[in-house]
Image (spheres, helix red, strand yellow):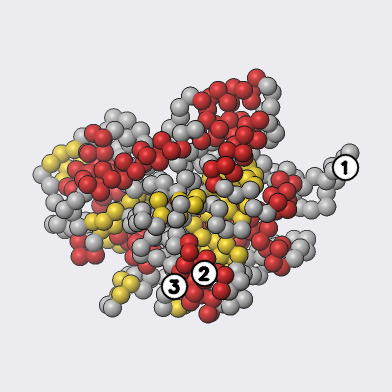
Amino acid sequence: MFSGSNRKFEAFKDKVWLASPTMHGEELEYVKHAYETNWMSTVGENINEIEKAVTGLIGTKYAVALASGTSALHLAMKLAGEKLYGMPAQGQGALQGKRVFTSDMTFSATVNPIVYEGGIPVFIDTDEETWDMDPVALEKAFEIYPEVKIVVMAHLYGTPSKIDELTAVCDRHGAIIIEDAAESLGATYKGRQTGSFGKYNCISFNGNKIVTGSSGGMLLTDDEEAAKKVRKWSTQSREAAPWYQHEELGYNYRMSNVIAGVVRGQLLHLDEHITLKKRIYERYKEGLKGLPVKMNPIDEKVAVPNYWLSCLIIDRDALCRQTRDDGQALFMGEHGKSCPTEILEAMASVNAEGRPIWKPMHAQPYYRMNAFVTKGGNGRARTNAYIEGGVSDVGMDIFSRGLCLPSDIKMTEEQQDRVIEVIRACFG
Ligand SMILES: Cc1ncc(COP(=O)(O)O)c(C=O)c1O
């Protein structure tokens, strides 16, 4: 139960989720096929078929099905590192001691694989128009660290980055792009699918994604040698010999044919999921009209997102006082104003799941000592991101004013309407 603005809102009997799996039936058929044919391992028809389907959809020449998006990103880092810096010594990563530029406002899995390979992430501030990597800040970063050769960019919440601008900067500095399209499967930039722009790219089939295998991911590339390497590395780097023969370090990263069965069924429904997600975004946009908030920015003239998560951001002058430390948040309610903490608590009290914006990586305790580059040059983490004269840290500004709304495609219109009313009551 939530009381606000002299109104009471009943809690939903069944939880309204941020983004939960939506199954259709075909998934079970393909899983059953794996079971009945006894391909209950990391080999089988489901794997072959989804690799074919994804290359057909995204347009890269090769797709390698892996255990997760994170493992795909890990092997992408290893590929890029070995290509640029050669084979590492035993016990060292392929990026040992090398700086890599990465999106800052993203999920940690974009960044951690840099560290798995011994690299040093340098965080690039966020662009206000896309909520993705800022090309101006990226250019600035190359002025400060001209030796950098790898840039990892995520398309947050399913909205493509400014790919032309970012690619132009990378080309100018001879850097390789790795695209983290984990959240943006099906989104297009100037008519071309995300996941097809970088040299090595990744998608994810994690349980909360636009289509899911319960887990799973893929590495995408046009480079045949790279695809072959990933197939080998992901199956323990076995050589063609009668016994277990190893010339390289191996990983157990290949996708299971059972998981691939779920993915195979889900891929049939990607377009339908995107249509439903878009409807949710548009209904929020309409329903929240008149409030001092905006939805996450989308410009369909350039890029068509997959609308994975709908988010809102509160206008600066309508933000009530809110403070967050490394574990808790507090706010002071004010008439006509609100904040992410108040809205998230209100939604939770009616059994609806929202989430704070992904907290920028440069503000994470683990990465607090890493470099962070803004439009203005070398930045530092600030809790008060908005200072006189402009925003000093776009990521923290969006984090302090924004939140992710329930975006589950099984949410009914009535449920969504109640969520909207609860948000309205927070500003009462
Ligand atoms: C931006 C981003 N990158 C990478 C990942 C990692 O994918 P996975 O969970 O499949 O390892 C996720 C999601 O989990 C993500 O949201």
Query: In front of the other: label 3 or label 2?
Result: 2
Q: Which residue is labeled 1 in the image?
A: 241
For ligand 1, tell me if the residue under mark 1 lies within 8 Å: no
Whole-percent x and y of residue 339?
25, 56
Disc 3 and disc 1: Cα gap in Å?
A: 51 Å
Instruction: Answer whether labels 2 and 1 touch (C-beta < 8 Å).
Output: no
Q: Is the C-beta of the residue carrying label 3 under 8 Å from the nearest atom of ligand 1? A: no
Dot 2 lies on which element?
Answer: helix
Q: Spot the residue most to the top.
A: 36
Q: Mark 3 vs mark 1: which is more N-terminal?
A: 3
- At 55% across and 69% down in the image, what residue appears? 170
Depth check, mark 3 against mark 1: the one in front is 3
Q: Circle 1 — which element?
A: loop
In the rendered structure, find residue 136 and report the number of the disc placed on it: 3
Q: Amino acid at mark 2?
A: Ala
Could you say which is closer to the camera, residue 117 or residue 144? Answer: 144
Relative horizontal placement of residue 267, taking residue 314 as reference (left or right): right
Q: Nearer the viewer, residue 209 or 168?
A: 168
In contact (CB < 8 Å): disc 3 and disc 2 = no
Query: Looking at the picture, which amino acid does disc 1 mark?
Result: Ala
Name the residue tied to disc 2.
168
| Residue 64 higher or lower than 340, as above or below | above
Q: CA distance from mark 3 to mark 2?
A: 11 Å
Q: Position of residue 244 (x, y in %)?
A: 84, 42
Asked if the residue at label 2 sits under 8 Å from ligand 1, the reply is no
Provide residue 332's location: percent of width, then percent of height.
21, 58
Disc with the residue nearer the chain's start (2 vs 1): 2
